[in-house]
Amino acid sequence: ENEIVGTNSANNWQYSFPPSCVGEVGRIGAPSRREIGHGMLAERSLETILPSDKDFPYTIRVESTITESNGSSSMASVCGGCLALQDAGVPIKCSIAGIAMGLVLDTKEFGGDGTPLILSDITGSEDASGDMDFKSNTRFSYAQPLV
């Protein structure tokens, strides 16, 4: 009757995107919509590789503060978060990496022949100039444990 309903993760994920990382000046306060959304992207990727509570009964905190951004900072957070977990000795299931992809439909305006292009690891200008961008993460399985 007095039970709390819902999920209660012992893990803490934090993604910070201060104005200085894009050369701007601004106030830092409550997390922005961007910080919450990009943090959730990184969290969803990293949670898939965590050990069970039985195998690793400790709280995990991963904090990613972006210092400069000219591409996908959320996918950089996936890569950095995975490396940080390995460095901390967390027995993760496998390594993962994140990448931002882009699509340019009309390449003639950029001097191409009109054939659509799929771009990988897009920069900020490619993100702004392209027709679509999306994030992807991959899992690399190893024959031997990562610990």
Image (cartoon, rainbow, N blue to C red):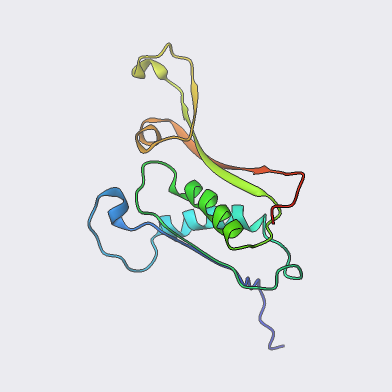
Question: Which image quarter: residue 10?
Answer: bottom right
**Relative depth, front residue between 61 and 25:** 61
**Residue at x 47% of width, y 37% of height:** 133
In the image, residue 104 sits, relative to residue 81, either above or below, namely above
Residue placed at 68% from the left, 57% from the top?
Answer: 92
User: For residue 27, what is the image quadrant?
Assistant: bottom left
Q: Is residue 85 left or right of residue 64?
A: right
Q: Residue furthest left?
A: 25
Q: Nearer the viewer, residue 142 or 127?
A: 142
Seen at 48% across and 55% down, the residue is 37
Image position, residue 135 (x, y; %): 53, 42
Residue visible at 58% across and 44% down in the picture: 97
Q: Horizontally, is 84 left or right of 9 in the view?
A: left
Question: What quarter of the picture does the C terminus occupy?
Answer: bottom right
The furthest residue to the top: 113
**Residue 11 in the figure: left or right of residue 66:** right
38 vs 76, nearest the viewer: 76
> Where's the N terminus, which quadrant?
bottom right
Image spot of residue 99 (x, y percent): 52, 40
- How many numbered marks have been drawn onto this rendered protein structure? 0
Q: Where is residue 61 in the image (x, y as percent from the top left)?
A: 54, 67
